[in-house]
Image: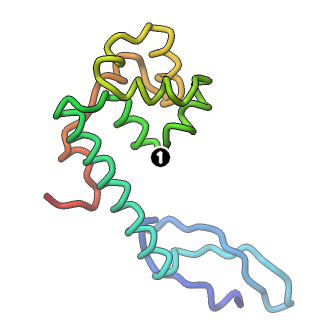
Amino acid sequence: MKKEDVPQDVGLNKGMKEIVYAVDENGRYAQVPSLGWEPKNIANDQAWEVIDEGIISEIELIRAGKRSPLAYHMVKNLMDIGLLASYVRLPRWRVKRHLKPAAFKRLRPEILEQYADVFGISTIEIHEVPDISETAKFCED
């Protein structure tokens, strides 16, 4: 793509530019600021909608007493059981068990601290789950 053909479609970046590479007038690759590209912006919007739906689904399960708050923080941070298990250095089956409310309530402070450190929050915040209205970016109820 030539430097002058770099798309400038405003999207999720809200006016912030990202750097892309394009061919300049001398035939060399150069860094060019871009506001975005409409197809990419549409794909990103759709991806965030799916993520928001997953977060809402987990909050509903937590409120229904079927999941622990750990599930919310895991989904919010775009993690699955395997990834979270590797970060906290626990077997997958233990992390999966900690997603159950009863098991989560009995967690030792050291384990809670490991989870909190991974999510960059306190052990008090790990018990907190926001209302659905506070989390939805794209989904309308």
Q: How many marks?
A: 1
Towards the viewer: 119 or 10: 119
Residue 126 vertical placement versus 137 (above, below)? above
Residue 50 vertical placement versus 122 (above, below)? below
Which residue is at a point 42% across and 66% down the rendered structure image?
12
User: Looking at the picture, how far across and down is residue 133, in whole percent?
Assistant: 18, 47
Horizontal side of 32 relative to 47 (left or right) equals right
Residue behind mark 1: 78
The scheme the figure's colours follow is rainbow
Q: Residues within 10 Å of mark 1 (few under 14, many from 20)?
A: few
Query: Which quarter of the figure is the C terminus placed in?
Result: bottom left
Residue 79 vertical placement versus 14 (above, below)? above
User: Looking at the picture, how far across and down is residue 52, in whole percent?
Assistant: 32, 54
Task: Indicate the quadrant where residue 112 lies.
Answer: top left
Horizontal side of 70 relative to 24 (left or right) equals left
Which residue is at a point 62% across and 24% down the rendered structure image?
89
Query: Which quarter of the figure is the N terminus placed in?
Result: bottom right
User: Looking at the picture, how far across and down is residue 24, in whole percent?
Assistant: 78, 87
Residue found farthest to the left:
141
Horizontal side of 24 relative to 137 (left or right) equals right
Which residue is at a point 62% across and 85% down the rendered structure image?
6
Give the amino acid at mark 1.
Leu
Task: Label 1, secondary structure: give it.
Answer: loop
User: Looking at the picture, how far across and down is residue 20, in whole percent?
Assistant: 67, 73
Task: Indicate the quadrant where residue 87 lies.
Answer: top right
Which residue is at a point 53% across and 19% down the rendered structure image?
114
